[in-house]
Each structure stands twice: as C-alpha cells, then as structure tokens.
Amino acid sequence: MGEAIGSAKEAAGNELVVAFGRFLGAANRLEHVLGRAIEESCGISHLMFEVLLILARAGEAGLPMRAISREQVLTTGGVTRLIDRMEAAGLVARGANPDDRRGRMVRLTEAGEAKAVEASRVHVENVRRYFLEPLPAEHREVFVEDLRVLSRSAGDAVGRLR
Amino acid sequence: MGEAIGSAKEAAGNELVVAFGRFLGAANRLEHVLGRAIEESCGISHLMFEVLLILARAGEAGLPMRAISREQVLTTGGVTRLIDRMEAAGLVARGANPDDRRGRMVRLTEAGEAKAVEASRVHVENVRRYFLEPLPAEHREVFVEDLRVLSRSAGDAVGRLR
DNA sequence: CAACAGTATCTGAGTAGTCAGATATTTCCT
DNA sequence: AGGAAATATCTGACTACTCAGATACTGTTG
C-alpha cells in the first residue's frame, strides 16, 4: 500500500514534487511556531500581527477592510471579526470611508503602532536566532535570491489556483 | 509610522529577514489554496490528506494516535477529533495497541487507501501545473537541493522554538 | 511492590474561522 | 434618470480547532 502512493507520485511527479511537499509542510510548521512565539510574548495572534504590519505600511489614513481581506488568507467575514477583536483590544480604530459609504476605513491607534513595533522586534529576533543564524553559512547568501524567486512563484501559483 | 517599523526591521534584521518573511507568507498561502483544491476535488480536508499520507507510509499495522500528533501541527485533542471524523467517513479504523493498552492504533481502510492515491494524484498534478511548470527554467534544478536545505533548516528551527 | 510521576487518549467549554444570506451603496448600462 | 448587477461589510449558524481536566494505563524508584 505504501507502494501505491509511491508509484502514484512516481508516475505523476518526481524528486521535485516530493521535495516541494516536504518543504511546504516545514514552512507551514515554522510559521505556526513563529506565530505562537509572538502570541506568547506579545499577546496578539499571528493574523493580528500581519494586520498590524499591513496597516503600518498604509499610514495615517488607514485602509478599507477589503484591502485586508485581499492580502490575507481570510474571508471578508473573518476580517470583520478579526478587526472587531483588534478594535476591542484598542489596537485599531474604524472610521468612515469618505470615498465609499459602503466601506469603512481601519487605521492603527497609538497602541497599535507600539504593538506593531514591539511584535516586529520579537519576530525578527526569533527568525534570526532560530532560523537564519543556524543556517549553514554557505547558504545564507544564495538564499536571499532564491527566497525572492520562491515567494514570487508561490504568489503566482496562488493567483492561478484561485 | 511606517518608518518606525521600517527602522525596527533595519535595526534588528536585514534583507534576508524581510525576504524570509514574505516568503513564509507566500508558502503559507500556497499551501492553503492547494488544500482547498484537494478539498474541492476529493472532499477531504488538507489535514486529512496529510494523515492519509502518514498512515499510507506506516503500512498494515497503522500508527498510534500520538505519532500523528507529533508529525502534525495539531494537539492531541485535535487529532482525536480529526480521526473521529475520518473514522466516521470510513477512511481509517481504530484498533487496540497490543504494546500499550493506554493507546490505540489507527490504520487506513481500503477506502482510505483509495482516497490517499486519488488525492495524491490531484495534489501532485496541481503542484506541477500551477507551481513547478511555470517556474523559471533556470531555477528548476537548483531548487531541488535548496528545498531540501530549507526544509531541514525550517524543521530544525521548529524544534528549537518549541 | 506501593506510590508516584509520566504518557495516551478522550471530552466539555471556549474561540476563531467559514459560508451564506442580509443590507447599504456604488457602478454600469440603456 | 432607472434599474440591474456588483461590491463592502455585517451577522447567524456551523465547524474545527485549542486548552484544561478526567481517565486509564505504564514505568520508575525507594
């Protein structure tokens, strides 16, 4: 029975597909534990952290909700509820969208900005300490470029798939 | 305010950390849509698919539940419930563990094996079509090795972080 | 071997997402 | 302008996880 799977993979795929599968799993687990780490030291979920970063980039005026659901792996309903919680926690504020009265703008509060900075520090530090520094030295340079290509290719694939 | 984040990242990190962050997000989204694709064409969730593969590798005797929660991003409680559903769907069966009467063994049913093969085909085909084939030709070869290093490094990081 | 710490699984309660449908507003077409 | 189709957000009902605590067994240690 193991053979059945093995041969299905052999027939349709190759080394690369298998390596890719393992790799996606590993990346996922890593993001998972990095998210946990932020949660424990900063008290915000991984998704909240991503939203804080998105809003920090957006500046003073903030963004409509829809912009957040587009950048995230979250439905619009999920964004509504996530922003509800972040608003309750004082990290963001909702306001009217002057250009479109269906929509609303979300922007960081002061506390939200502070939390974004704090969580970024923790996150960057974790990535460095637990992933980058232990990386075999001969790979560190090569990876910058590969990571870019991988990110872009993965993004393209996501676009094609949905 | 965008500056605050920017400089926090600059201070603690570098190109690599930023590239890495974008990349992790992209990998995650990709796994997410690949999971969706399987769900739509095979009627099983992403996690069920992973469990099917794990059990297919394990062979006739199956595995104790604990082995599954170790390979997955799932708590033991989550595994109990996932296996409950898979059992209800006829994909796996639970049995006694002769070596340890606290635990139970989980193994694939015939239907589970068939589903594993079916879902593997779909998944491999999706990875090839949407990710690998569009990959710039000059990267395809290089990546096999890099993916391995990345998978291992990510796995190590996960181990260190938790 | 009795007690106790440890491990495997299950379960009740709580939380965070999904989906589908409601509402308000905009956009586009004629 | 008038009305249909599209879009932005919110909500109720549902699902699938987590956490903590219960139960049952195992392994260790004095």
Image: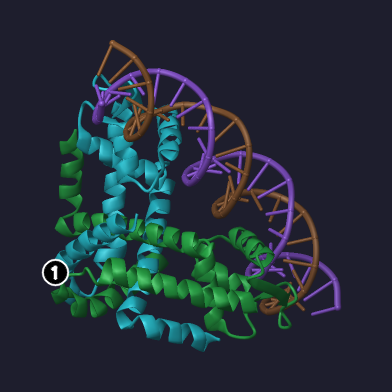
Chain colours: A cyan, B green, C purple, D brown
Image quarter (top left, top right, bottom left or bottom right) of the N terminus of chain B:
top left
D6 relative position to D29: left or right: left
Splitting the image into 4 quarters, where does residue B125 fall?
bottom left
Q: Nearer the viewer, residue B54 or A44?
A: B54
Q: Nearer the viewer, residue A96 or A42?
A: A96
Which residue is labeled 1 in the image?
A141
Q: Residue C7: horizontal and vertical position, in percent?
A: 63, 71
Dot 1 amino acid type: Glu
Is residue A42 visible in the rendered structure shown here? yes
User: Residue visible at 20% across and 80% down?
Assistant: B141
Q: Secondary structure at mark 1?
A: helix
Q: Is A149 placed above or below A82 here?
A: below
D17 relative position to A118: left or right: right
User: Residue visible at 70% across and 73% down?
Assistant: B94
User: Residue visible at 28% across and 67% down?
Assistant: B131
A137 relative position to A1: left or right: left
Q: Nearer the viewer, residue B6 or A100?
A: A100
Q: Residue B151: horizontal and vertical position, in percent?
A: 33, 72
Q: Is B121 placed above or below D12 here?
A: below
Q: Is A137 placed above or below B20 here?
A: below
Is residue B20 visible in the rendered structure shown here? no
Image quarter (top left, top right, bottom left or bottom right) of the C terminus of chain B:
bottom left
Q: Is B48 placed above or below B117 here?
A: above
- Exactly how many numbered labels are in the figure? 1
